[in-house]
Image (tube, rainbow, N blue to C red):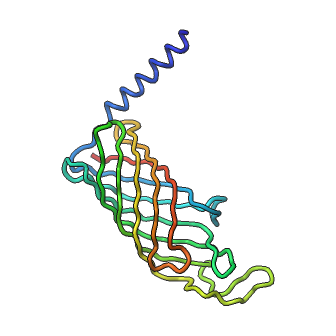
Amino acid sequence: MLHKMRKIILVMVLLFSIGGYAQRKNDGWAIQGHYGIMKGEGQISKFASTASVGVSHYPGSKGFLIEANLFVNDSYVDKDKFNLPYRLYGLNVIGGWSYENLQPVFINLKAGLIGGFEQVNNGNKTTNWNNLEGVPLQVDTDRFVYGAVISPEIELAIWRNLSGTVSFSQYWNLRSDVSEWKYSGNIGLKWYLN
């Protein structure tokens, strides 16, 4: 019984301390990093993945937010009966709104534009697998792509200026021949600068 009481008190103290540091400041800035897992396999790791670093700005006191992130997506795509390595290096610029009445939890709804450099098959215009070496691919292997992204996110204040995030991102690459729709489940950290 005493052990249970200690756990309950510890949880209450942690929640109280988190709540005490969960205040965002008007006109606040944050730096952030995210790592996400996508459907399929990747070249870097066992899972297809995405990683990003960026900044967020919270102008005024109405919950609006603006964000910009540099990102890379690493996966394989199926095209012309080949499983091709795929990378997208890019920038997203996102706007949105944050529901802040559940402090220390924030619900961020974000949408915006993406643009970047898409590389298929490591830039090789022909295949290089098994008995199929030298077969020309019917896609551009290096090109600029652009599109849109939506990303609902839950943010939890951890300690002082540090928050943890969990989000889902849906990418729509308008100009891509091989990767129109991609999605990822992401975790991340956000550090508020002021």
Residue 188, percent from left and from top: 46, 50
Quadrant containing the N terminus is top right
Number of numbered discs on residues? 0
Q: Outermost residue, right direction?
A: 131
Q: Outermost residue, left direction?
A: 60
In this orientation, which residue lies closer to the viewer: 119 or 138?
138
In this orientation, which residue lies closer to the viewer: 137 or 163?
137
Residue 172, percent from left and from top: 45, 70
In this orientation, which residue lies closer to the viewer: 71 or 36?
36
Relative vertical location of residue 87 with respect to residue 66 in this rendering, above or below: below
Relative vertical location of residue 128 with respect to residue 98 in this rendering, above or below: below
Residue 98, percent from left and from top: 30, 49
Residue shown at the point (20%, 47%) measured from the top left: 61
Residue shown at the point (46%, 66%) measured from the top left: 171
Residue 179, percent from left and from top: 54, 73
| Quarter-of-image position of residue 57 | bottom left
Residue shown at the point (26%, 52%) measured from the top left: 58
Residue shown at the point (35%, 36%) measured from the top left: 104
Relative vertical location of residue 165 with respect to residue 94 in this rendering, above or below: above
